[in-house]
Image: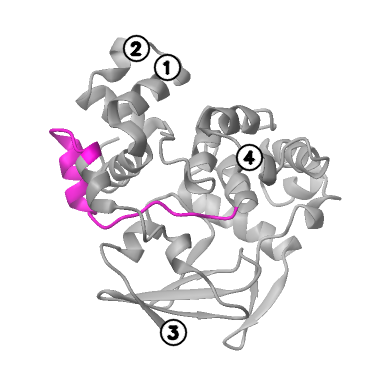
Amino acid sequence: MKSLTVDRFNLKDTIESGQTFSWISEGEGYVNADLGQVIYVEQRDNKLFYETSSHSVDLRKLFRLDDPLEKIQAEITREGIMQDSIAFAPNLRIIRDPLFPCLISFISSIQKNIPAIHSLMNSIRKKWGPIYTFRGKSIHGFPSLEELSETSVSDFDALNAGYRSKFFVKTIESMNKGEVSEEQLRKMDYEEAHCMLKTLHGVGDKVADCVCLFSLGFLEAFPIDVWIEKVIQEHYPIFKKDGKTYQKKSAAAREYFGQYAGYAQEYLFYYARNNDLK
């Protein structure tokens, strides 16, 4: 396997913090088959050991290893639970996942827990995704927009997607028609991209923020779910002052935590979920 020396990075905390459904636990590490090939990565101390089934991969980009973590944490630190959250996982970084799998995974996340999201994503991979051979095993990757262009609501219903089936089909139709494209989104600023994503069926404020943060790289995005809502309400007064709508809460969080609000969100989320602070 190839190796990469890393500084201030924890692979487990990064992948298991609820921000990605493309990386799956495998042996001593994690595997990702949603990038046009299979990638395996494991960490031993300050080294990442990795192997691919085809072409080379830029782990520095995928794991945002060049983000100035010390500066980020200094800017988002606030007294109380924010300090505890950073101390709990000081080397957690924001992921950079491919857009389409990220989008579908967070549409899947509506009223589903993390194991259930993984299960649905894996079912979609097995039914329509490409098959790669890696270390003598067959591994399914996530299907492309084109590969899902003929799917129907009943197809997704068969995978127990529930009401999300309609969201999947209509979102796939819109993107295949070019009504929303990755190329467009990556040319936009955060507010523009967030609004465009919300034109897709099943994409509300929170799902749009997750895609903005975990795929498009808008580090100011601040997804608000029940965990974050509870933590902010109990520890910081910013929501009470600025109103009850998601938009006002999001704007308040971005103003309070600054340009790296997404990192603040992820530290708080991971800490709250692992310490039963719901």
Q: Tell me the CA gap for discs 3 and 2.
A: 50 Å
Of 179 and 204, the residue lying toward us: 179
Query: Which quadrant of the figure contains the C terminus?
Result: top left
Query: Is 247 left or right of 275, judged from the image as shown?
Result: right
Amino acid at pointer 3: Lys
Query: In the rendered structure, which segment of residues is drawn in magenta?
Result: 75-98
Q: Which mark is residue 185?
A: 4
Q: Looking at the picture, how far across and down is residue 243, in whole percent?
A: 38, 11
For the residues labelled 4 and 2, the Cα–Cα distance comes to 28 Å
**In which quadrant is the N terminus drawn?**
bottom left
Let me know if residue 236 is in the magenta part.
no
Determine crowd level at label 3: few under 14, some 14-19, many 20+ residues with C-alpha closer than 10 A: few
- Please state which amino acid type lies under the numbered disc 1: Lys
Q: Earlier in the sequence, mark 4 or mark 2?
A: 4
For label 2, the residue is: 242
Residue for point 27% across, 66% down: 7
Image location of residue 134, percent across then percent down: 60, 83
Q: Quadrant of residue 132?
A: bottom right
Q: Are marks 2 and 1 in contact (CB under 8 Å)?
A: yes
